[in-house]
Image (cartoon, helix red, strand yellow):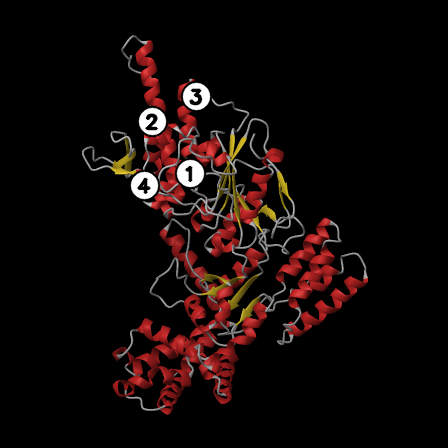
Amino acid sequence: MAVRSFDIPATRGLVRAQAAELPNIVAIAGPNGAGKSTLLEGIKARRQQFLEPGSELLYVGPHRTWRSTQLSDMHVSGFPYSFEDILKADSIPQYQYGPPSGLHFLSGMIRNASSADESNALAKTSLVRLSNQKRDLVNAQFEAQGGQIVAGTVPDLLSPLKQLVSILLPHLEFAGIDSAANQNIRVLFRRAGLVEGPTFDIDDLSSGEKAAISLFLPFVEREARAMVDGDHTPVPTVVPITVLLDEPEIHLHPLLQLNVLEYMRTIARQERAQFIFATQSPVFLDSLQDDELYILSPPGYATENQLSRLSASAERLEIARSLTGSTHMLTRGKPIVFVEGESTVTGNRSAVTDERLMKILIPEVEHWAIAPARSRNEVVSAAKSLRGASLHLPGMPVFGLVDSDTSASGLPDFVVPWPVAMIENLLLDPDQLWELLKDHGQTIGMTSLNDVKRSLDAIISDRVGEEVRLRIRATMPGSFITTDKADSQQATDDIDRKVAELKAEIGQIDLPARAQEYRARVQAILDSGEALERFHGKSILSEFYKRNSLSKVYSTVGFKISAAQSAAKGARIRRLTEPAVNRVRLYVPPNCVEVIGRGVETPERAQLIAELASHRSAWQSGTPISTDREKLRESLAHYARQQEAVVAGEIFQVANEIGTP
């Protein structure tokens, strides 16, 4: 029945990991240092406690190697162990008549997550053993049948290997065992379809090809054993083995990772095995179903049990995937920040996206998981939706970061506006633009910093009318007008009605007064000297590129990236971005005092309420307190562990959202 539940106590960095009603596919994700490898080792060490009767446990460590070997008949006959036997063992067994050259150090080597797992060095020996067993069966049948062999009486014990290769590695085919030179037995493969093509030894396959074969070699052996025993029907109530895999994706190409996962699912559906594996692979994570995916939160981010299902329903998991673009982002243990702009993954890889510019301009962004959204409204909607998706995120608050090109009013406090119209405004630093261009002065006709400033001032002056129009346009009612009518006249009437409604709505607006209001606002921006921050940055940067013939020295993409790299070195970028970055980095949730107030009344609670109120007030005023944040989170965790489960979970959620420097 495999491992259906476990409870791993404090071990190394792991505080506690507990789970029940586990399926046959269990993927454990989480950031580095959360304790995934420690958890697998904990299950392995306590396997007799967790395995149900009739099941056995195999372990595959994370540091897997493959050593080329020159095998002889003596080596194989002196090694009576299957590959499954090796993966069951805590240490590697020894060759009875001496090991092959280069493998003398393997005997007795401990197999754990802290050292190299050398078990793959014995995969070749195990395959040759299968061939020898087939040879022995042929000899036995030859004698039993009076010097002949009736067709079909000797099973092909290597046919499961052929089938495995055809499914996972369809570009290859197994070509047999070459034992002509009994001091150098080879396990041969060739390119699929090339019957007369060259063959090559298993040692000469790619790392990924060898990894795929070794992962499922125990199942090849089991199928071969069933052929010998004449038993092809597994006991339906018993899952015979649980396989612990630490990062099965190692060495595997993304497409091969998908094939491996599907092969595991096939075996699991047939009740032939249970797979419990730790993974950081985006390919695996994006392909897992909601009941297969578990998240291991770092110590301190959970009430007590660090392990939980990421989502309690397929619908919520798919919502989260659609919002962030990947499951991997949900398991990284970093704040998730939605920003306006196209993704560098799904979009044009040569485009200079907001995400790409942010990573150049602001070092702190490396500690965020950036999720691009196409507009301000999508940023706000995505951040709200992910916060409300009831996911078990490992200490990852969710934020939005939007351009303040119109108004910041009405935004939730976890959606933070830049102090600029858009991220390109951060590149409009005259000093740093001159630093970038001064070596090309003669080519582009610029000889001083004043030339840069005069060019920018002229562009700003020419944009005044357009800036007024942009602001009016942003506040005007609008509608995407279409119809679902099948009749032409009905469709025309329907569209005319909707247009009339929109016209009537616009007619209620005092446009001259609104235009006057926005002309005054634009003039106020000019008078304050903030046009480089508050006017349309994309347009200004593009016009600066055109007017100064910068195409002579830079492509448009090259200029934008170089301008960002130069701007990142200036003082202006820090002055403009630190307030917004600190609102994300040093966030204090609005309900923090209310949630702590639900706990048991103690002096500790009173102190926490006072500290949280002070931190929240400072954050709201734009001067967040950065000191003692870790200590505050630790105090909240300590207090939470004294509460009943529901309140404890709410307090931990608050603690997880409190940002640290």
Q: Residue at the spot x=42%, y=47% of the render?
A: 250
Badges 3 and 4: C-beta atoms under 8 Å apart? Answer: no
Q: Distance between the residues labelled 3 and 2?
A: 20 Å
Front-most of residues 592 and 72: 72
User: Where does label 3 land, which residue?
Assistant: 232
Q: Element type at marker 2? A: helix
What is the three-letter code of the residue carrying label 2?
Ser
Q: What number is the disc on residue 131?
A: 2
Mark 1 element type: helix
Query: Three-letter amino acid code at disc 1?
Result: Leu
Q: In which quarter of the image is residue 468?
A: bottom left
**Residue kind at label 3, given as amino acid type:** His
Q: Earlier in the sequence, mark 4 or mark 2?
A: 2
Crowd around label 2: few <14 · some 14–19 · many ≥20 (10 Å):
some
N-terminal label among 3 and 4: 4
The mark that comes first in sequence, 3 or 1, is 1
| Viewer-side residue, 585 vs 130 | 130
- Relative to 240, does residue 651 appear above or below in the rendering? below
Residue 590 seen in this snapshot = no
Residue at the (55%, 36%) spot, across then down = 23
Q: Where is residue 280 in the image (x, y as percent from the top left)?
A: 47, 50
Q: Marks 1 and 4: in contact by CB < 8 Å? A: no
Q: Which of 413 and 265 is in front in this view?
A: 265
Q: Taking 273 as reference, is 133 left or right?
A: left
In this view of the protein, can residue 115 be seen by the observer? Answer: yes
Image quadrant containing the C terminus: bottom right
> Whole-percent x and y of residue 598?
76, 57
Q: Nearer the viewer, mark 2 or mark 1?
A: 2
Q: Position of residue 312 (x, y in %)?
A: 58, 45
Identify the mark at residue 215; answer none if there is no mark.
Answer: 1
Q: Name the residue under label 4.
A: 203
Label 2 – label 1 distance at C-alpha? 19 Å
